[in-house]
Amino acid sequence: MSEEAAPATIKFEDFTKVDIRVGEVVQAEPVPKSSKLLKLKVDFGPGLGERTVCAGIAQEVSAAHVLGRRYLFVVNLEPRLMMGIESHGMILAGQGPLGLSLASCECPPGTRIH
């Protein structure tokens, strides 16, 4: 087991800039010509609505597995072009001894996580 360096500390004000919300995956499909990406349509509730989020999770989970489930997403990242698809967020996940674990939450879509 390798040791990781201690993370750099940040000010509380920096943390408050990250907008983490609950989103429900309403559509999911593999991205053509990519073995890693899933294209997710995610409902973030009133105010934020639906957004497309590309996630590099296809080697660990199937589109069917994530469909209809609620996960945590960073929603205020600058949009990023991934395999020709504009992604508007990032799903939160961790990699452990048992594989990939997506950060889930049963709160309603759009709930802000503090």
Image (cartoon, grey):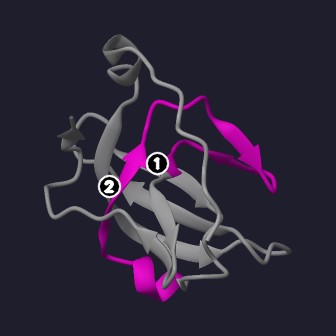
Label 2, on which residue? 23
How many numbered marks, from 0 up?
A: 2
Q: Is residue 3 above or below residue 47?
A: below
Q: CA distance from mark 2 to mark 1?
A: 9 Å
The residue under the point 23% across, 40% down is 113
* Residue 67 point in image, percent of width and height: 39, 78
Where disc 2 sits, the SS reads strand
Task: Tell me if 103 is positioned left or right of 8 in this view.
Answer: left
- Other residues around mark 2 within 10 Å, as few (<14) / some (14–19) / many (≥20): many
Label 1, on which residue? 51
Which of the two discs, 2 and 1, labels the residue nearer the N terminus?
A: 2
Q: Is residue 73 above or below residue 25?
A: above
The residue under the point 52% across, 48% down is 90
Task: Tell me if 103 is positioned left or right of 95 in this view.
Answer: left
Task: Tell me if 107 is positioned left or right of 63 in this view.
Answer: left
* Residue 99 point in image, percent of width and height: 53, 81
Image quadrant assignment for residue 112? top left
The amino acid type of the residue labelled 2 equals: Gly
Q: Indicate yes or no whether the magenta region holds residue 33.
A: no
The amino acid type of the residue labelled 1 equals: Arg
Q: Indicate yes or no whether the magenta region holds residue 67.
A: yes
Q: Are marks 2 and 1 in contact (CB under 8 Å)?
A: yes
The residue under the point 29% across, 65% down is 104
The residue under the point 69% across, 68% down is 37
* Residue 66 point in image, percent of width and height: 42, 77
The boundaries of the magenta stretch are 63-90
